[in-house]
């Protein structure tokens, strides 16, 4: 399906919302410049801090739940745009990953193979940068990752993976309200966004779907239409699974 130019602009607006993405990404990426990050990666093997990874149908309201959850737990919330800004950061490549690889040749590639198995050899350059970003962020502290299939890139025993779903009708209404457009146009924006999402998962993760057994928890927001309650449920279950997170 060829998108209308106007819908492409609306989609970009929907992805970014009102968040100051570049500023937040620079702030988070600044943590990579800490002098002890390479030592921490080396000393701790492939173990990472417990993290919450949120997967979602487009337009379901996962970012709102993630932000509430971040406030409850005192964790950083890294959504699609922030993760991509960090993974594209020249500072990340030149000052952390490249420096680390110079001192310990092949170590991060070794970690990738341990975590991802044979899939590590099939990753695109973009997927590797995304892995590096998620890997380093999860090494430093617990985080909440939203989107981009990060639960498929981190050790599964250190991830609390949540999937949000809801009906297309509800998601169209949410997008229409968010972008202040009619539902017909919102449906086209949703269709385009879902095509982009499916293409991403096919290329980066070699996956066509997100089966329920990939996740610790699947929430249908048609029936749990309360982001506070959703965040509270995840909070309780995450702490039960990882009691070391205060």
Image (tube, grey):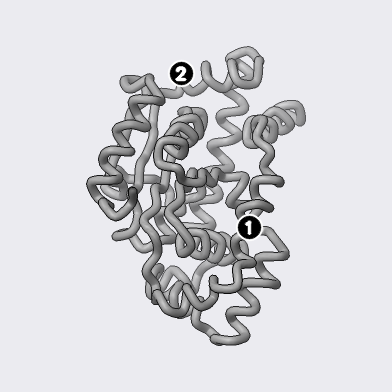
Q: Secondary structure at mark 1?
A: helix
Residue drawn at x 46%, y 50% is: 143
Lateral position of residue 188 relative to residue 115, left or right: right
The spot of residue 140 in percent (x, y) is 48, 62
Q: Is residue 7 above or below residue 123?
A: above
Dot 1 or dot 2: first in sequence order is: 1
Q: Residue furthest top?
A: 182
The spot of residue 148 in percent (x, y) is 51, 49
* Quadrant showing the N terminus: top right
The residue indicated by pointer 2 is 169
Query: Residue 18: which quarter of the image?
Result: top right
Lateral position of residue 154 relative to residue 37, left or right: left
Lateral position of residue 22 relative to residue 147, left or right: right
233 vs 106, nearest the viewer = 233
User: Residue 179, labelled with which disc?
Assistant: none
Q: Secondary structure at mark 2?
A: helix
| Disc nearest the viewer among 1 and 2 | 1
231 vs 111, nearest the viewer = 231
Residue drawn at x 56%, y 66% is: 128
Q: Residue furthest left?
A: 240
Q: Is residue 209 above or below residue 110?
A: above
The spot of residue 111 in percent (x, y) is 44, 75
Q: Is residue 57 visible?
A: no
Q: Is residue 169 above or below residue 62?
A: above
Query: Residue 221: which quarter of the image?
Result: top left
Label 1 to label 2: alpha-carbon separation: 37 Å
Residue drawn at x 52%, y 64% is: 136
The residue indicated by pointer 1 is 29
Lateral position of residue 123 relative to residue 24, left or right: left
The spot of residue 217 in percent (x, y) is 29, 40
């Amino acid at each position: 399906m060829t998108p209308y130019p106007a819908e492409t602009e609306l989609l970009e607006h929907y992805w970014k919302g009102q968040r100051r993405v570049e500023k937040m990404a620079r702030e988070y990426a600044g943590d990579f410049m800490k002098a002890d990050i390479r030592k921490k990666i080396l000393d701790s093997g492939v173990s990472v801090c417990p993290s919450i990874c949120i997967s979602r149908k487009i337009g379901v309201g996962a970012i709102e739940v993630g932000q509430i959850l971040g406030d409850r737990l005192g964790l950083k919330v890294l959504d699609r745009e922030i993760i991509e800004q960090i993974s594209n950061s020249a500072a990340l490549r030149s000052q952390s990953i490249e420096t680390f690889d110079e001192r310990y040749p092949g170590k991060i590639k070794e970690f990738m193979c341990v975590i991802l198995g044979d899939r590590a050899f099939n990753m695109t350059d973009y997927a590797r940068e995304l892995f590096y970003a998620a890997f380093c962020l999860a090494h430093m502290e617990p985080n909440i990752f939203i989107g981009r299939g990060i639960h498929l890139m981190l050790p599964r025993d250190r991830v609390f993976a949540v999937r949000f779903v809801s009906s297309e009708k509800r998601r169209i209404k949410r997008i229409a309200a968010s972008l202040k457009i009619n539902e017909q146009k919102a449906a086209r924006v949703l269709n385009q966004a879902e095509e982009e999402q499916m293409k991403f998962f096919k290329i980066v993760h070699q996956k066509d779907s997100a089966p329920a057994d990939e996740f610790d928890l699947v929430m249908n927001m048609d029936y749990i239409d309360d982001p506070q309650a959703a965040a509270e449920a995840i909070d309780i279950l995450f702490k039960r699974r990882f009691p070391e997170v205060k």
